[in-house]
Amino acid sequence: MSWLIKFYPDLSCFEGIDGINNTKIRHRLKKLFYNDSYRVYPYEKPQERSLYKYWKNRRTIFKLIDEGDIFLTDELWFSVTPENLAQFTASYIRHCLPHAKYVVDVFCGGGGNVIQFARLFDKVYGVDSNIDHLYCTYKNAQCYEVTDKVNLIYGDWEAVLNKTLKNKINQKQDCIFASPPWGGVNYLKQDTYDLEKHLEPVSLSKLLVLLFKLCDNVVLFLPRNSNLDQLSAITEELLGPGEKCKVVYVKDNGYMKGILVFWGRPFYDFSDQYPEGNDNAPKLEQERDINIRMEDLY
């Protein structure tokens, strides 16, 4: 293992890996860099047959994938946000929060959203409990030349949000984005996805309780078959009567990918940007107390 002692990759943008308890994590991270692990060779089919359908659509995941500098674990092949969707999410948040500087991406995975946030905001904090995924995020951000705007925080999401972000980051976060695990590729076997029972690692209500403590503006990417009645009920329970969330159904490459759910008045109240009577103000349709705008983006 002497080769690791002499190998010094740049780990400056990784938080939460210092200290005696994280020796194995630092060792693992250095080994990943040394071995150039998880590099995607764009014209080589994956050995795992179940990943072939994702490989066929690889250019929708990362448009620069043909350059050979994208890194993905097997899990990331089906969990990374497609680039078109990540671009839309970042652009929409930028439009609604024109003065925002700092964005947190919880469960950042392979960095699809982190990269697009970094292109539009001053600083992005990516959080994940899987060091292999954080490594892939760094390498992918490097491909898109945005590592100078990215801080990657290793650790349990709840501990990071409760302690690390509060202690190490002085700036108030302008927006928190999260794409929590949906329970694998079988989530569509359910007619209606129960956000309290099947969302991981905790129920939607528990996740939102913590996120709302840190920031008023919260955005989640959830399954397309999510229970909208639950969304409405949980929003009213946590924020009070009359409060709203906006649901946007999103497609990419002709397929419905999921829903983006926005909490925070800037995402649905455009009165400051569009004075009354301005015909350019976005038109919103209402259903079950949830504002639904755009059913098809692409």
Image (cartoon, rainbow, N blue to C red):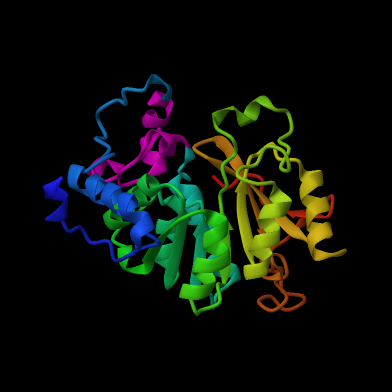
Q: Which residues are magenta?
A: 51-78
Count of numbered circles on the image = 0
Q: Along the horizontal axis of the image, is 238 left or right of 208?
A: right
Placement of 225 over or under 246, stated as above or below: above
Q: Along the horizontal axis of the image, is 225 left or right of 130?
A: right
Placement of 228 over or under 7, stated as above or below: above
Residue 212 lies, in percent from the top left, at: 68, 65
Can residue 126 be spotted in the picture?
yes
Residue 218 lies, in percent from the top left, at: 63, 62
Residue 76 lies, in percent from the top left, at: 42, 39
Residue in the picture at 74% in, 58% down:
245
Residue 13 lies, in percent from the top left, at: 33, 64
Residue in the picture at 36% in, 55% down:
22
Q: Is residue 269 or residue 163 the one in the foreground?
A: 163
Q: Quadrant of residue 166?
A: bottom right
Residue in the picture at 83% in, 55% down:
289
Whether residue 52 appears in magenta in the rendering, the answer is: yes
Seen from this angle, which residue lies furthest top? 49
Q: Is residue 24 or residue 272 the one in the foreground?
A: 24
